[in-house]
Image (spheres, coloured by chain):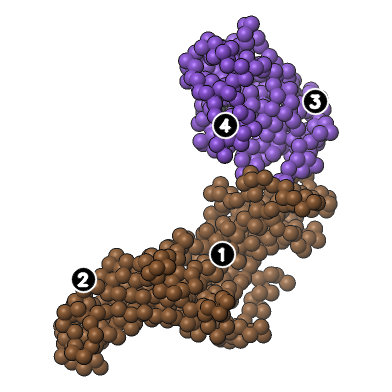
Amino acid sequence: MDPADLRLKNFIPADKFPYKSVLGWEYDSGNYQAALEKAMDRIGYAELRKEQAEKRERGELMGIGISSFTEIVGAGPSRHFDILGLKMFDSCEIRVHPTGKATARFGTKSQGQGHETTYAQILAEELGIPAAHIQIEEGDTDTAPYGLGTYASRSTPTAGAAGAMAARKVRDKAKKIAAYLLEVSEDDLEWTPGAFSVKGAPQKSKTIQDIAFAAYTNHPPGMEGGLEAVSYYDPPNLTFPFGSYICVVDIDRGTGKVKIRRFVAVDDCGNIINPMIVDGQIHGGLTMGMAPALLEEISYDENGNISGGSFMDYLVPTAMETPRWETDKTVTPSPHHPLGAKGVGESATVGAPPAIANAVVDALAHLGVRHIDIPITPEKVWKILRDAGAGL
Amino acid sequence: MFAANFEYHRAGSVAEARQLLAAHPGAKLLAGGHSLIPLLKLRLAAPEAVIDIGRIGELRGISNGGGALRIGALTTHAEIASSDAVKSGAAALAEAAGLIGDPAVRNRGTIGGNVAHADPASDLPTVLIALDATFTVNSPDGERSVSAADFFQGMMATALGEHDILTAVNVPAGGGGSAYVKFSHPASRYAVVGAAASLTVAGGTCTSASVAVGGATAVPARCASVEAALAGQALSADVIAAAAAAAGGDLGDDLLGDVFASGDYRRAVTPVYVQRALAAAAERAG
Ligand SMILES: Cc1cc2nc3c(=O)[nH]c(=O)nc-3n(C[C@H](O)[C@H](O)[C@H](O)COP(=O)(O)OP(=O)(O)OC[C@H]3O[C@@H](n4cnc5c(N)ncnc54)[C@H](O)[C@@H]3O)c2cc1C
């Protein structure tokens, strides 16, 4: 049976989500068929299978590998997740200043994932304050709200959600102030990003900047001044991003060298906050995922001594080894995340190694190969070819 | 690591370098520094003095005369790779120089430093052996010329004495065709296996063949059985493949290996690279 058909036949159907797995997890949302079909269309799957059959006739080695995966990220709901008793919520603290600009602090810490951009966009969207007017601060334990940090693709699912929730608290207070300023009841107001206006009389409105100034100068009697909020967000569930990757390899029969000819990655991380950042995470993750598949290994001799000495032996991929990644997406929002978003940081490192390894195994399948230990080095492939009498 | 302390001297001419060498026993010459500096930093070498010959103009440049290219010892890999004279007269050398490391290495590293260092995974020794190059050496008692076969003596060992300065590499600019192909190590780009071939063809048959393989052995190996199998033959793909098949046997018994590629593997892929080098050289030989 074709590996794509096998997957399409066995996927959890889209209408079965949220899906309770036998292991106890409840997958929040998914449409696995759509992701794989998109990857197959994009790469021209049927054509590639034809090409492969022709090449096999001629003795040329070409393989197509598929990997469809579900990730489990955004730890996590405090009823299930803690570290030594510390519940795994995450946090955001927002202060909108009289100028209408804001400072927001988070319990996570970007290590290059671009939180400053993503978080500012979340708050800009929720509050209507331009992203450039929002200062994001992370990583100083003297000033940050308590949080469990950045790892396991959890920042957007947890702290990002906390940002949205804190912003909504700010907006609730802003609405009260706007009602006071416009002398109407809160129920008569409607929100368009950046301003509250009176239903049916849109010329009567107060911008978030007007409201912020009023919060410190002219706030309703009986209300405390200021415009700030905190959220410790305890996610109701994890998020389950997913995707389907297809890799095409050509193998040099003389040397066993594997060349990645094409690699299409279709990812679904729910609603996307910043496409470029998500793409960057996937590009980096794919390269990092290629590393264990083809290159990186700590090898030991029979006495347990490490036989490599340096980065001359432990092969970290560089731009030279990295093929042109082709990324694409489907969007299946998370039903429980306030923004419908899911984590994406590690999706590609999860999906890439099996796609590559499957492609190599597929190229050699007619020789009886069903498995190769990673990293798949040229020498390993050459040994397989030699033993099968299929080398040059 | 930092290098051990050393005195630094800069020579403005070969004569001055000679005086400095005489005055500082055990001193090391510095050209592009891309092999010496790593050795110093790993403290695999700790000379008391380093004599920088990198700016001696007379040692740099490529000239063409009397059927041979004279390549000054300080000519960089990048200059060799882009030289029209080298590309047309000794294509394999231009090709090998262009495949060394990365642009930074090619812009700093020199042919003289490369061959004097004689790393078994270097590209240029293999090509220079296949092309029957000769090496011009300035020594305390005058100038001498050393053939490639005599120059490379072992792993990182050459015919250069402690007071010798390599001044030029002379490469016959033949009428035939030559080529170099290599399996680059993924981290360093040094040759896991590199094969150089040089062929002349007259009246449709091969009149001379010379083939060398580097990376697999301490000193690049001349592939005598491959050469013998080609002589007098019309260079069809089958003839080339059959001749190349014998290349693994020309490597002797002591093969280099590491965690990335064992000796057995290097021997096994040698015919593949020899065959590819021969095919490219045959096409250029016409
Ligand atoms: C990251 C990296 C990748 C590399 N990849 C490759 C590769 O793929 N293929 C390859 O072939 N090489 C490779 N190299 C080596 C490179 O080619 C070096 O440049 C070359 O080996 C040394 O040349 P140099 O001018 O830098 O010599 P230096 O480092 O200055 O000197 C090297 C040695 O030669 C001696 N010496 C220098 N000039 C003379 C002279 N005129 N007379 C007598 N002795 C002299 C020095 O005393 C020293 O012992 C790589 C190097 C690096 C750092």
Determine which quarter of the picture holds residue A358. bottom right
- Which labelled disc corresponds to residue B224? 3
Quadrant of the frame with the N terminus of chain B:
top right
Residue displayed at 71% across by 61% down: A362
B157 to A350, vertically: above or below: above
Ligand 1 positioned in quadrant = top right
The residue indicated by pointer 2 is A99
Assign a secondary structure to mark 3: helix
Label 4 in the same subunit as label 1: no
Which x, y percent locates residue B262? 76, 43
Pair 1/3: label in front: 1
Q: CA distance from mark 2 to mark 4?
A: 59 Å
Q: CA distance from mark 2 to mark 1?
A: 41 Å
Q: Secondary structure at mark 1?
A: helix
Disc 4 versus disc 1: nearer the observer: 4
Q: Is residue A232 above or below residue B144?
A: below
